[in-house]
Amino acid sequence: MSVTVTRQDPRYKALMKGHNLRFPANPAEGVDRIVLCESADDAAMSLQAIVASGLRPTVRSGGHCYEDFVANNPGGAILDLSLLNTVGADSRTGEYLIASGASLGEVYTELYKRYALTLPAGSCGTVGAGGHISGGGYGLLSRLFGLSCDWVTAIDVLTVDANGKVVARRVDRANDPGLFRALRGSGGGSFGIVTAFRFASLPKAPLEVAEAMLEFPFDSMSEEQFVALMTAYGDYWETRGRDPDTWGLFAVFEVGARSRDRPLGLYVQFCQPDGTANDLSVLHEFFDRFRAFSPSITSPSHHAPAKTQKSPAGTKNPPAPYTVNVRPWFEATIAIGGGGGGGSRGKYKSAYMKRTFTPAESKTIYRFFSGSSKAAQSSVISIDSYGGAINRPQLASETSIAQRGSVMKLQWQCYWRDPAEDAEHLRELDEFFTAIYTGEHVEAHHQGTPWGDRYEGCYMNYPDADMLRYPFWPQLFYGQGELYPFLQQVKNTYDPNNIFHSAMSIRAK
């Protein structure tokens, strides 16, 4: 049975907002009700009642939407699926099932404990499966196994027809194949309400992973040294990182404000294709590239203590200036946990990169984080490795993720707490992002954006409403080929009345 929370309910204040406290912008912009659904039938009946009342429905699984697409809905209703969180196997079909309200932490725990399986998905355990998988979904195992949406073989979804009737569908390659493709990567909030994802098979969970971390003193690093470090990092993923024996290697390189107590951090997780960490030569080969930059001797201290440590295998190099911790994959995955931004105000941006950093890009990043602006002091760029199994070209036509040629994915994150500082943070971060993609390395008609032969645009799971100022914003997120027109046709067919919409939802033709 669904639970309805109205403005008069003491739970309303806590449930009317998600993790980004910028939204709703003010109480008047908030919804009139939140409907918590425990089953797909609950969701169908609640959606029908909302549509019949002429209200706008928005949908929430984990509450991590970066923009105002859910909480800002004056007079409308949020359908909250967080109680619809089953993870298991369907005894009738033999498929594995992940309900939209399940958090990634619940997904990892249930799949591992029940079946010794996993899903290549994100590292923030509180993110909801519904939005994450709908937008593609990637994480530390994606170079080895691909995106979350690549594994989906059927989807349970609620749509609304031209007469306002809610229709429950199970879509796959044979049944409503266009909608099936659209729901695998285009993002949530455009076509209907996904209640569950189904999987004919899933990858076996690794037995163990190796973790290691390098830190570089940023406060004493010259601009020239920083450019060389960024180039070395990007060069690896553009060249050696394409080789299949490296696909079990995932790295996160974080760049933030220059200060003595905030070094540059390079975290790595690795396992071989067989799920073990017996041969660490790939990891050590990668870290050997950074010896010249005088990294600090460190260990991945933000994780739990290692149970075992292993020295390099298959290499004659002397001991490296770091500790390699090897521990069970499940332990490492659960330890990563929460993720940033909860309980604060935030702004986010993204870019896919097909090649290493240009000197101009690196210099712009260095100069921004050397400054004293509010955004420089409260922001970080996470530069994730990408590619590997993700970049199988045939998947671009099977899913709604067009970006299948990138080697890195960047995420800008900016956090603050004072609402009075909103405009300043938003302006400074936007100017920073625009500056990185302004110059000879970007095509003339697309200045200020990651467009051209070096880039593949932006990631819809990191929506950025600033991009709406560009008439080509759909191509930034969905590529320059046939995908966006295809999605528009699916929109016309399955949501003819535009029931499901936001500032960045698919536009009907």
Image: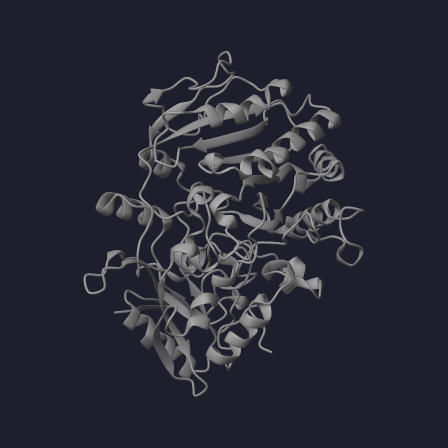
Q: Is residue 281 above or below residue 13?
A: above
Q: Residue at x 66, y 49 (%)?
A: 455
Q: Residue at x 35, y 23 (%)?
A: 306
Q: Does any portion of residue 129 appear in the rendered image? A: yes
Q: Residue at x 52, y 75 (%)?
A: 491
Q: Is residue 178 above or below residue 125?
A: below
Farthest residue, direction top: 318
Give whichever of 193, 274 is nearer the camera. Answer: 274
Q: Quadrant of the C terminus?
A: bottom right
Q: Quadrant of residue 363?
A: top right
Taking the image as shown, residue 88 lies to the left or right of residue 175, namely left
Place of residue 268 in the rendered image (x, y in percent of width and height, measured from the top left): 48, 31
How many marks overall? 0
Q: Quadrant of residue 158?
A: bottom left
Q: Residue at x 32, y 77 (%)?
A: 45
Taking the image as shown, residue 450 lies to the left or right of residue 507, namely right
Taking the image as shown, residue 486 lies to the left or right of residue 96, namely right
Q: Does any portion of residue 414 appear in the rendered image? A: no
Q: Quadrant of the N terminus?
A: bottom left
Place of residue 483 in the rendered image (x, y in percent of width and height, measured from the top left): 57, 66
Q: Is residue 22 above or below residue 370?
A: below
Farthest residue, direction bottom: 163
Place of residue 481 in the rendered image (x, y in percent of width and height, measured from the top left): 62, 64
- Say how the picture is coloured: one colour
Place of residue 32 in the rendered image (x, y in percent of width and height, measured from the top left): 44, 71
Give whichever of 79, 330 is nearer the camera. Answer: 330
Q: Is residue 166 above or below residue 244?
A: below
